[in-house]
Image: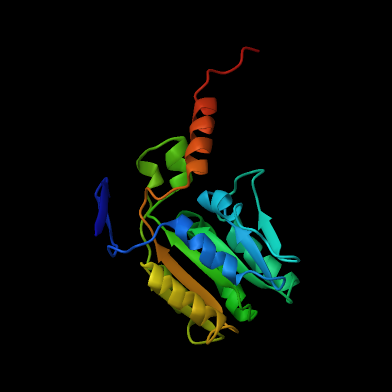
Amino acid sequence: MLCMWKIGCENLEFNLEDDAFNVSSAEDMLKEMLSGNTAVIAETGDSWFNCQKLRLPENCGYEFQMQYGSIGWSVVATLGYAQAAKDKRVIACIGDGSFQVTAQDISTMIRCGHPTIIFLINNGGYTIEVEIHDGPYNVIKNWNYTGLVDAIHNGEGKCWTTKVKTEDELVEAIAAARGTYKDSLCFIEVFVHKDDTSKELLEWGSLVSSSNSRPPNPQ
């Protein structure tokens, strides 16, 4: 299945397999990874709503940032959490747009030897902003995210990257991250369709859009 959309002079194409999964179907896989020795970091955006549905085991950490809605927050928070709580393996769910803001902190994660697992959700843009106020500014330049992380790794430290487009590939990637690469930073790029969003985000985006479009209150 070819998913393509055009914005300005740029075509963005993702070749997804016919058995490609949606984000919500990955929840059960993520739940199986959680224990009292892990912590979840949920990025601003649809990860807010998807990760809120997780049932956390006792002593499993969980952090998200709703107050300011700062995109890119989770990359930095993942670094800080892993450095402070070395008894836990951090599992982060981060959108591609957010990752582009603070991607360089991957370098410090590798240098510090953090065995973090990062799920990079690649859907080609700022999905949360699309639901609030759609426009050409919500589509971003696609990166070779695993290639970027490999370049930062540069053969120094422990780091493993992979791309997944199907449920079976994600199962294999998670198994590798928990087994062969359990002591490495694992960066798993997950390709999903740009319209693959939770119903909670759709509802929330509609409410915020309505609020933002109101005329200013008279002073």
Q: 111 left or right of 175?
A: right
Residue drawn where x is 42% and y is 41% of the image: 130
Is residue 44 in view?
no
Q: Nearer the viewer, residue 215 or 22?
A: 22
Q: Quadrant of residue 158?
A: bottom right
Q: Is residue 56 or residue 189 the one in the foreground?
A: 56
Answer above or below: position of 120 versus 111.
Answer: above
Image quadrant where residue 43 sits: bottom right
Q: Residue at x 39, y 72 (%)?
A: 168
Q: Which quadrant of the figure contains the C terminus?
A: top right
Tell me if 11 is positioned left or right of 80 in this view.
left
The residue drawn where x is 56% and y is 72% is 117
Q: Is 31 in front, or is 92?
A: 31
Q: Is residue 187 above or below residue 44?
A: below
Residue most toward the top?
218
| For residue 143, side relative to residue 201 (left or right) | left
Tell me if residue 16 comes above or below residue 188 in the rendering.
above
Q: Residue 164: x, y in percent?
A: 39, 70
Position in image of residue 196 (x %, y %): 40, 50
Task: Give x and y (percent) for residue 49.
Answer: 56, 49
Q: Residue at x 50, y 73 (%)?
A: 187
133 relative to 112 in the view: left or right: left
Q: Quadrant of the N terminus?
A: bottom left
Give above or below for 145 relative to 13. below
